[in-house]
Image: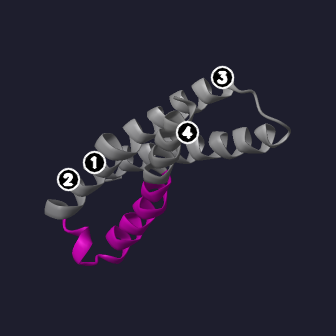
């Protein structure tokens, strides 16, 4: 069971971090008025990426990571890992705030 939870954790983390890397590219495309900046395309894509893909993947990553930690407490690398997770959560929340502001044309 531990093995499958670890696989689920890694897959969810990969999806979440892929979204964290791709969303800024969409912000830049909007700023440059590229083809991707058309509101007919940009709004549905960014909303689906953030709310339907990234946020559930983040929740699964954090939940399963907590279960894995409770199952098998790890060594000294855990502090570094928790710092990276906290940074990723803050970045995720910041991107959500940017989407909200851009959704209101600010």
Sequence-wise, the earlier of marks 2 and 4 is 4
Foreground of the two, 103 or 43: 43
Sequence-wise, the earlier of marks 1 and 4 is 4
Image vertical order of residue 22 relative to residue 65, above or below: below
Give neighbour class at mark 4: few <14, some 14-19, many 20+ (Cα, 10 Å). some
Under tag 2, what secondary structure?
A: helix
Q: Magenta span covers which residues?
A: 17-38
Mark number displayed over residue 90: none
Q: Mark 1 or mark 3, which is nearer to you?
A: 3
Which residue has dot 3 on it?
71
Give neighbour class at mark 3: few <14, some 14-19, many 20+ (Cα, 10 Å). few
96 relative to 6 in the view: left or right? left
The Cα–Cα distance between marks 1 and 3, rounded to whole angstroms, is 35 Å
Sequence-wise, the earlier of marks 1 and 3 is 1
17 relative to 69 in the view: left or right? left
The answer to whether mark 3 and mark 2 are in CB contact below 8 A is no
Which residue has dot 2 on it?
44
Quarter assignment of residue 82: top right
Sequence-wise, the earlier of marks 3 and 2 is 2
Which residue has dot 1 on it?
47
The answer to whether mark 2 and mark 1 are in CB contact below 8 A is yes
Mark number displayed over residue 6: 4
The answer to whether mark 3 and mark 4 are in CB contact below 8 A is no
Residue at 25% in and 71% down: 36
Quarter assignment of residue 28: bottom left
Q: Position of residue 11 (x, y in %)?
A: 46, 48
Q: Position of residue 53 (x, y in %)?
A: 33, 45
Residue at 80% in and 43% down: 77
């Amino acid at each position: 069971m531990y093995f499958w939870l670890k696989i689920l954790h890694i897959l969810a983390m990969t999806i979440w971090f892929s979204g964290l890397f791709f969303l800024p590219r969409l912000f830049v495309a909007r700023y440059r008025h590229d083809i991707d900046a058309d509101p007919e395309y940009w709004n549905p894509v960014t909303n689906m990426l953030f709310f339907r893909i990234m946020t559930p993947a983040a929740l699964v990553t954090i939940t399963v990571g907590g279960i894995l930690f409770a199952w098998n407490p790890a060594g000294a690398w855990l502090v570094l890992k928790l710092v990276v997770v906290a940074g990723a959560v803050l970045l995720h929340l910041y991107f959500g705030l940017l989407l909200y502001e851009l959704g209101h044309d600010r």
